[in-house]
Image (cartoon, rainbow, N blue to C red):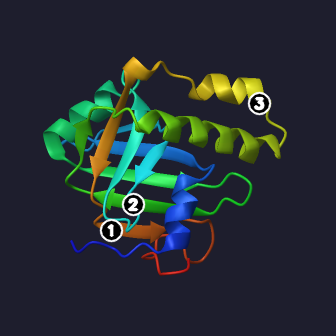
Amino acid sequence: MSQPSLDAGQIAFMRGGVSISVATCAAGGVPELVRGIGCRVADDGSSVTVFVPESKSQAVQRDIFATGRIAVAFTQPSSHRTMQLKSDDARVAALAPEDLPLIEAYRDAFVAEVGQLGFNAGMVRLLLTCPPDEIVGLSFRPQAAFTQTPGPNAGKPLESGA
């Protein structure tokens, strides 16, 4: 797989107040899912690290150790705009000190995003709260990117500006 070219708008979207869903599967095809609580995206889109609660991501981590495969969906709740990245080189990575401000900024952005839909800020913050020593990163180089926004283009390769 060749690496997709993510544009600045797509990278900004991924760094914003989007819902992050991380999916893996075991060699036998059994799927696993965990909610991301933030991400780090290289300015050129060449690498992505999604942060997840360590205790809630055991099966996902096990799949990554076994296969390296990962699929991550970034969805804006207010518009349902969704993009999905896939890779087969995922690895589990330790949290770096500079990641904590990214996680806090993500939490604030997501609270603001779903707040406009009527969700209680305290409830959303609780959903995304995790002690720093219980957070791990799932790092990968995107190898495929798709638009998954509901509609006729869902499942098509992501294009610049989409």
Q: Determine whether label 3 and label 1 are within 8 Å by CB.
A: no
Q: Which residue is mark 3?
A: 121
Mark 2 or 3 closer to N-term?
A: 2
List x then y, in percent, for residue 69.
24, 50
Secondary element under disc 2, as helix, strand or loop, is strand
Q: Determine whether label 2 and label 1 are within 8 Å by CB.
A: yes
How would you rate the neighbour count of disc 2 (Cα within 10 Å): few for under 14, some for 14-19, many for 20 or more? many
Amino acid identity at mark 2 = Leu
List x then y, in percent, for residue 52.
42, 33
Real-space Cα separation, disc 2 to disc 1, in angstroms: 6 Å
Q: Which residue is mark 1?
A: 144
Amino acid identity at mark 1 = Ala
Amino acid identity at mark 3 = Ala
Q: In the displayed orientation, state which residue is furthest to the front.
A: 98
Residue 152 versus residue 133: which sits nearer the camera?
133
Closest to the camera, between mark 3 and mark 1, is 3
List x then y, in percent, for residue 47.
31, 58
- Residue 124 lies left or right of residue 56; in this view the side is right
